[in-house]
Each structure stands twice: as structure tokens, then as C-alpha cells.
Amino acid sequence: MIELEGLTKRYGDKLAVDRLTFSVRPGVITGFLGPNGAGKSTTMRMVLDLDNPTGGTVLIDGRHYRQLHNPLRVVGALLDAKAMHGGRSAYHHLLCLAQSNGIPRSRVREVLDTVGLTPVAGKRTKGFSLGMGQRLGIAAALLGDPQILMFDEPVNGLDPEGIHWIRNLMKSLAAEGRTVFVSSHLMSEMALTADHLVVIGQGRLLADTSMSGFIAENSRGYVRMRSPDQERLKDVLSGAGITAVPGTEGALEVQGEDAAHLGELAARHRIVLHELSPQRASLEEAFMRLTAGAVEYHAHANHQPPPPAAPGPAWGDDWRKKGS
Ligand SMILES: Nc1ncnc2c1ncn2[C@@H]1O[C@H](COP(=O)(O)OP(=O)(O)OP(=O)(O)O)[C@@H](O)[C@H]1O
């Protein structure tokens, strides 16, 4: 279990992490989601005592990291896959870590096998591809057989096979009852992996919710309607007690009504429809709405369409923490 209480980090004028309070529980994968620069890596570094908090606390199984007698046996982490001595072989890199942390030599072969690097164990790591480096970083995290694991953007730059492998590894670690805390800036990736979701933006907590709850709330369907007689359509809908909100390209969007029912209603009033299409908002769109006010770096590409407007103002609002 990892517990954060009011965790804060300031770099000069920059408030990188702003009073974060949440817990990461065992037996599930907790996704740590936020746009670039949201403060995910800084938070993870503070968990491992690699950065001093400006305020607040973070405890690992009830203790500060520096109070752990044998930290690698309690918490394993992949923060930066390139942080290794390029002149050493994969085997020697792990052996050094094992020897300096009182971990038996036999464990090195075991973790090399788990991550599929046994055939290249004797090769120098400076020749490793990004994917091989990620696997070696994961082997180092697993070395002390810890109950708590943290992975910072582990799928970055990996091919589909590598991504699939990491997903399954994290699932099996959580199924063994371990605490798995993984960061990403991709909602689509988290939707496939995480059981629980913690979303931050500009250092602040935006949501702390189950993944299934987030999906149920945010992938609700709606119906898009377009007509050359849009004003009359709006009146007819409103006369039937149906709320329609403006969508993209002049369409109307209706939530909570069946497309067939809406089509029949329009037909009864002899309104021509150019579009009557059931839609499902993607989780990526829900995430973008949730973090819209908290994105640090915006691209200025005019050809990029904005995320579609949400039908109804309350979408995503349920997940915003009060007072954030
Ligand atoms: N050592 C540092 N000195 C000054 N500012 C820093 C330092 N480390 C991080 N920051 C700033 O703190 C903020 C949070 O950065 P952090 O790397 O934690 O975000 P992140 O969510 O991990 O982003 P990304 O997804 O891009 O890795 C950013 O604005 C970053 O520029």
C-alpha cells in the first residue's frame, strides 16, 4: 500500500505536485494518468525518496522509504529505463544490484528469464534497444521480489508485442496480490490495463475512481441528428420534453433517447433528417475533457479538430474532486 497525504513539490515558482492525497491499494493495477508535465514522475520520485517533498507525506506500508531496511525487497520501480551503466552486461548490471542489496545471486537468472532477456544476458546494455532496456529495468524492479511495484510510462516506445507482454506481466503481478502503480498519459492504454484510476493535471488530483465506474460514466451513448430544418427539429424535440445540445457541424446531440424513437418522432412531424446516428464518446475524449484546463503544453496545429463537444455540461464533472 502506498499512501500520499497532502504531498506537494515546488521547484522555484513551479508547483509540480499540489497537495496530492490518495492511496494505492494491493491486488489491483492503479493507473496514474495525466497529460505531459502533470507531475506523475515527480510524485513517483518522491515515493522513492529521490526528491524531497516541499510538504505532505508519502508512506510505503506505513513507513517512509528511508525507514525501509531493505528497500528493493519492499518496492521495485522502473522510472528511467536508460539509467544503467552501458558498459556492463545485463547479467552484471543485475548482479551488482543484487549484491549491494543482499539479494541471492540465483534471483538474477530468474528475473532475466521472467523478462525474456536470458539469450542476451551476457551482452553490454549500451547495445540494447529501447524495448530491451525497458525489460531490463523491469527485471531490476522485480529483483527483490517486492510486494509493491511502480512503473513510469513502461510502454513508451515499445512495439505491440512488448506492450502486450508488459500488460500481462502487470496483471499477473496484481493477481498475486501485489500493489501495482503505473503511470501513463494515454487513457486508451489505461482502459486496457488498470482496475483503478488516479488522474492528475498540473499537479492536482482530478479523479480517484474505479476504471469500471469511469467507463460506465464516460462512455455513455448519444444520438447525433442533422436536418435541413434544424430549428423546427429542435422545437419538436423540445415539445416532446427531449433536451438536445448543439454538436459539431451544426448537428444536435441527444442523450438518453433511442435513435429509432427520435427518427419516428421526426417522421411524424415530416422533418427530413440528413443524419441520425448513435454515437459513443471515447474514453480518450472523456480524459481530454477532464484535463482540458490542466494541459501544460498545447500544440498550435490549426488542422487538428478540437475534441467533440460533450452532450450535456456534466460529463466528466462527477470525477472532478470537490475543491480542485
Ligand atoms: N528538477 C526539476 N526542476 C524544475 N522543474 C521540474 C523538475 N522536474 C520536473 N519539473 C517540472 O515539474 C512539472 C511536472 O513534471 P513531471 O516530469 O513530474 O511531469 P509528468 O507528469 O511526469 O510529465 P511527462 O508525462 O511529460 O513525463 C513540469 O512542469 C516539469 O517541467
Image (tube, helix red, strand yellow):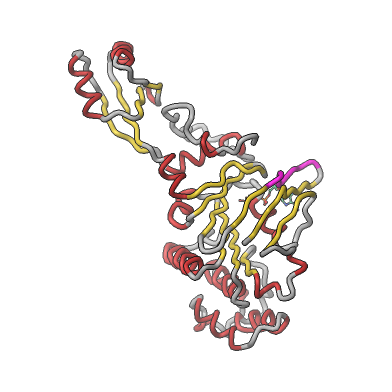
Image coords of residue 324 (percent x, y): 64, 36
Name the residue nearer the viewer: 207 or 162: 207
Q: Tell me if residue 134 comes above or below residue 54 in the rendering.
A: below
Q: Is residue 145 left or right of residue 222?
A: right
Where in the figure is residue 220, as x and y percent of width and height?
38, 37
Task: Tell me if residue 145 is in the magenta stretch.
Answer: no
Residue 211 vertical placement versus 274 (above, below): below
Query: What is the quadrant of the N terminus in the image?
Result: bottom right
Q: Residue at x 22, y 18 (%)?
A: 266
Farthest front residue?
Answer: 62
Seen as rendered, the residue at the extreme right is: 12
Describe residue 143's horizontal placement relative to residue 53 as left or right.
left
State the residue at coordinates (25%, 29%): 259
Q: Is residue 43 left or right of residue 180?
A: right
Asked which quadrant contains residue 112, the reply is bottom right
- What main secondary structure does the magenta stretch of the protein show? strand
Task: Tell which of 234 and 89 is nearer to you.
Answer: 234
Q: Where residue 135 appears, x then y in whole percent?
A: 54, 71
The residue nearer to you, when weighing 175 against 88, is 175
Q: Residue at x 60, y 34 (%)?
A: 293
The magenta segment: 13-20
Image coordinates for residue 75, horizontal then vertical, percent: 64, 69
